[in-house]
Every structure is written in structure tokens, then in C-alpha cells.
Amino acid sequence: MGKGEGSTKADNKKELEEANAVMQAWKYALGFTELAVLKCAIELGVADEIETQGGAATLSQLSAALNCSYTSLYRIMRFLVHNRVFKAKAAATQEATTYLQTALSRRLLKGGEKSMASLILFESTPIMLAPWHGLSAWVSSNKAAPPPFEAAHGQDIWAYTAQNPEHSRLLDEAMACDARLAAAAVIGSCPEVFEGIEVMVDVGGGNGTFVGMMVKVLPQIKGINFDLPHVVSIGPHWNGVEHAGGNMFESIPKADATFLLKVLHDWSDSECIQILKKCKEAIAEDNNDDSISDGKQIKKKRKKVVIVEAVIDDDYDDEEQDEQGSQLQSWTGVRLGLDMVMMAHTNGGKERTRTEWAHVLNEAGFSSFSIKPTSAVQSIIEAFP
Ligand SMILES: C[S@@+](CC[C@H](N)C(=O)[O-])C[C@H]1O[C@@H](n2cnc3c(N)ncnc32)[C@H](O)[C@@H]1O
């Protein structure tokens, strides 16, 4: 290979890189459109209408049923099909184009076990978007300025939701979306985690979705859904679950196991340690005696705290991640994204690495812990006093 040939190849590579960079920068500049158009499609009820029509609907059927302009709807659907949210079957005329449901578009249905619509609607509210505009000001103040949510709304997210019932309801519904997915993954992947538990308290359990679903599958467990009073006061009834209002920094109801799903990531290390100490107190009182059932002695399991959170890889390496399978790559992206959400929306919350979990659990006085992955974005951390 001559010198000139080598430099031409290098020049071509550089040009390609430059062209790609411009396209990527455009993609980032317009990144908000993906969230905004998904929100629009959910509000219009596009996936719901396609479902009503048996999983496929033409543009003219959709625009008539949703009572909207078909030319605008056509452009919205073209964007969503390009982004692989829906599928399209072309026809002789635009009006006859048929749109088909996909696994992803079913996540936009307003109801059902698999719906993630409330999560998308919640994250795209002006209230949750406003703090992002203050992220750089907070980071460059070296944390001296109020955190982004407080800077935008004058108080932290928990005080804000206590005073704004509609936003509190949106938050509960958004969290319940993921709690349904987490319940299926956690109970499905690791049912042994709940063996031997008679009473479990879900700390910061929101509207009780996780513990309600768990008790349905494992009815031998008595569930307590513990959250702030204004949250549990509007929680739905779940068979086998009692709602209890209170403050986890003060006292947590006694149980064989305390459970926390997406709660500790909302708090700084020192607050996390305080909550974990309260969880330890809740399982401390001895009722470790074995019980007798049908003349057989039932061995009780060790009391424990079960934490379900997205765990960031300790040895996170960008290049290595790029070479891994798409499943791992996408979860890593979601976990790192969630960490950014914690930075924008909480006062000191974060997604933690294994080393960071070891630190907070050790400081809270736990003697051992293990981390098990699940099929969901979160892992299960079992911590023993
Ligand atoms: C991110 S949400 C998670 C909800 C639920 N675990 C889930 O994953 O669906 C955090 C929850 O912690 C609750 N919370 C915040 N501060 C609390 C406190 N001091 N005591 C009890 N619960 C609290 C909130 O009301 C909210 O329901």
C-alpha cells in the first residue's frame, strides 16, 4: 500500500467520522422529539385505538376514531414507524396505510399489566422537565446552590408532591408501572428471596402495587405497604395487604423482612444509612422461633432487608460496553440514565455501584449482603444484620 493510498483511507475515515458527528449532534439537538411525540401518541390514544381495532388500523380509521386531522396524524405515525414504535403496511393511498401494534407500542396502552404510559407521561410533565434546565447551574456551583428540583419548584420533590395531590397521583401511577414490571421479574427470577417470610413491609411502597402483586403470588405472606400518610390514604385495596402511613426516617412497622424498591436511590449516602438503620430496627425484635404447622416444624429464615435497585457496574468501561450484546448495552444506558434522573430530581440521590452499596450497608451495620441480577433493570440486594 503506497503512502498516498493510506492517507486517502485515513482521510475518508475522518470525513465519515465528521459526517457522523454532525448527524449525531442533530439527533441530540432533536432528542426531545422522541419523548414529546410518544407523549402525544399516548394522549391521543393511538395504541389504545389500534388495540380496539384488533391490532391493526388504517390511517382513515384512526383519524376518524381519534377525531384528529389525518395529515398531522400521518406525520406523527411516520415518525413513530421510523422509530420502530409501530409498524406500517403501505397502501395505494395514505388514508389506506395500515398501522400495526408492536411489543413496544403495547407499552403505550393506557391500562394493563405491561403499560408504561404513566411513566412516560410523568417524566414529560413540565414539573419533571423544569429541573433539567438547572442541572449545569447546580453542578457548577459545586453543590452549593439548591438542587435542580428545589431550584425549579422551591422545595424538594416529596414536599412538592405532599402539597400537589395531582402530581402525587401521577408519581404513584408512574412508579406503579415499573413496580408491576419489577414484581414480575423479581418474584419470577428469584422466588427463593421470599421463602420463610411471614410478614413483609414494603417501605416507600407507593400505592402498594409491588406488595399487592407479591401477596397475590405468595399468599402466605402478610404484606404491609408503608409510605407517607398522603400516599397510603389514597392507595387502592389489595387483598392481604395493610396500608400504614408514617415516616421511614422515624420508625418502620415490625416485620420479618423490610423491602425497598426504588427508594434508597432517592437519597444521599447519609440519608440512605439512616433509612437502612430503621429497616434493621424493624426486623430486629426477636421472633425467630420456628413455628409448628400440621405437626411439622417450620424453620424460619434469617430476617433481612431486600433492596431492589439498578446497580451500576463498578468496572464501567465505555469501550467494553460498546462491544457487549445489545441487552447489556441498553440496560447500562437505562441505569446511567436513571442516575441522571436522580441527579435532576432528588437532593443527593444516585444509582449505586456494588462498592457504594457495600459502603452504605456496612455503615448501617449489616454483616453481609449479596446481589442477584433479574430480568428487569433492577437487581436484588439481600442484606443481613
Ligand atoms: C420512587 S418512589 C417508589 C415507590 C415504590 N417503591 C415503587 O417502586 O413503585 C419513592 C417512594 O418513597 C416514598 N417516601 C418518600 N419519603 C418518605 C418517607 N419519609 N417515609 C416513607 N416513604 C417515603 C414516596 O412517597 C414514594 O412513594
Image (cartoon, rainbow, N blue to C red):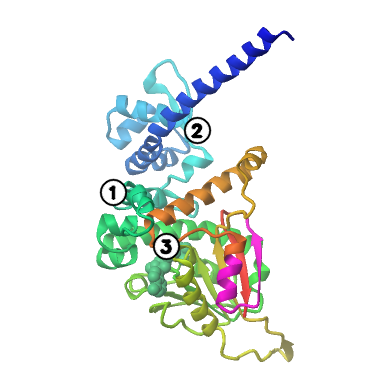
Q: Quadrant where the N terminus lies?
A: top right
Whether residue 30 is visible, yes or no, is no
Q: Residue at x 27, y 35 (%)?
A: 67
Q: Nearer the viewer, residue 134 or 312?
A: 134
- Residue 48, percent across and down? 40, 43
> Which residues make up the magenta segment?
357-374
- Which residue was labeled with disc 3? 348
Name the amino acid type tagged 3.
Answer: Gly
**Could you say which disc has been placed on residue 126 in the image?**
1
- Residue 241, percent across and down? 47, 76
Image quadrant, ligand 1: bottom left
Name the amino acid type tagged 1.
Answer: Pro
Upstream in sequence: badge 3 or badge 1:
1
Q: Secondary structure at mark 2?
A: loop
- Residue 19, percent across and down? 50, 20
Instruction: State the separation of the CA atoms marked 2 and 1.
Output: 26 Å
Name the amino acid type tagged 2.
Answer: Arg
Q: Residue at x 66, y 62 (%)?
A: 372
Count of numbered tags: 3
Q: Quadrant of residue 245?
A: bottom left
Instruction: State the separation of the CA atoms marked 3 and 1.
Output: 21 Å
Q: Is mark 1 within 8 Å of ligand 1?
A: no
Upstream in sequence: badge 3 or badge 2:
2
Tag 2 and tag 1, C-beta contact below 8 Å: no
Q: Residue at x 28, y 49 (%)?
A: 126
Whether residue 133 is visible, yes or no, is yes
User: In the rendered view, would you say 36 is above or below 18?
Assistant: below
